[in-house]
Amino acid sequence: MNKAHREFLASPDWARMLENDLLPWLESVAELGDDVLEVGPGPGLTTDLLRTRTSKVTAVELDSALASSLTERLAGTNVTVIEADAADSGLDADRFSAATCFSMLHHVPSAEHQDRVFTEVFRVLRPGGVFIALDSVDSELIRSFHEDDIFVPIDPNTLGDRLGAIGFEDVGVDVDDFQQRFTAVKPVR
Ligand SMILES: C[S@@+](CC[C@H](N)C(=O)[O-])C[C@H]1O[C@@H](n2cnc3c(N)ncnc32)[C@H](O)[C@@H]1O
């Protein structure tokens, strides 16, 4: 992420937007359960929302500076931070009651890599576990915010098929001018 982006994601303005926009939606779509995976926590304002609503959070962050500062800030809490690519987390299969991924997928540099993140999330969710995600849509405004940065937005029209091909069921996608929000369930077999 570029510097402006990193600073914004650690700001009180972003914390307020998460409280007012992300949180009501999150609470309305699914139960988090007792053991939550967070993919791409960044500075961790989304982690702060999650950690007060579940027993345990495991946050997987690729950027080593962000992973170490989050580890330091949340030491002694119910959050474990792992520095890894979410496409290859090394976590146990069938473990998590829910997996979340907020404003992260467009930072993954290709659709193929994004699909590997989805596949890994599917692997580590327990049967019946839910994947809850939000990401940007493609727009001039959001592109300009990612100058000199990776920006590979997901196409909401193909998202259902991509998740279905991996094995997810009950995929729900909700799109507006700025963002797409989706949920998907790992089936109980
Ligand atoms: C825009 S930030 C979002 C932070 C936070 N979820 C929020 O909404 O405030 C995206 C984060 O995902 C991380 N990230 C990007 N690719 C990743 C990957 N393959 N595995 C884990 N984290 C990744 C980035 O380093 C960055 O910290």
Image: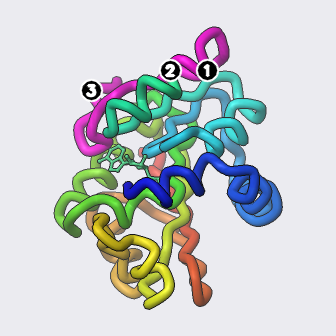
In the image, the segment drawn in magenta is 72-93
The amino acid type, in three-letter code, at marker 3 is Gly
Q: Which residue is drawn at the image coordinates 56% and 42% (left, top)?
A: 98
Residue position for label 2: 71
Q: Is disc 1 placed on a helix, strand or loop?
A: loop
Q: Which residue is drawn at the image coordinates 39% and 25% (left, top)?
A: 82
Q: Are marks 3 and 2 in contact (CB under 8 Å)?
A: no
147 up-or-down from 88: above or below: below
29 inside magenta stretch: no
Residue 14 placement, left or right of 95: right
Label 2 CB less than 8 angstroms from ligand 1: no
CA separation in Å, label 3 and label 2: 18 Å
CA separation in Å, label 2 and label 1: 5 Å
Q: Is disc 2 placed on a helix, strand or loop?
A: helix
Residue position for label 3: 90
Residue position for label 1: 74
The amino acid type, in three-letter code, at marker 1 is Leu
Q: Position of residue 77 (x, y in %)?
A: 66, 15
Which badge, 3 or 2, comes first in the chain's sequence?
2
Label 3 CB less than 8 angstroms from ligand 1: no
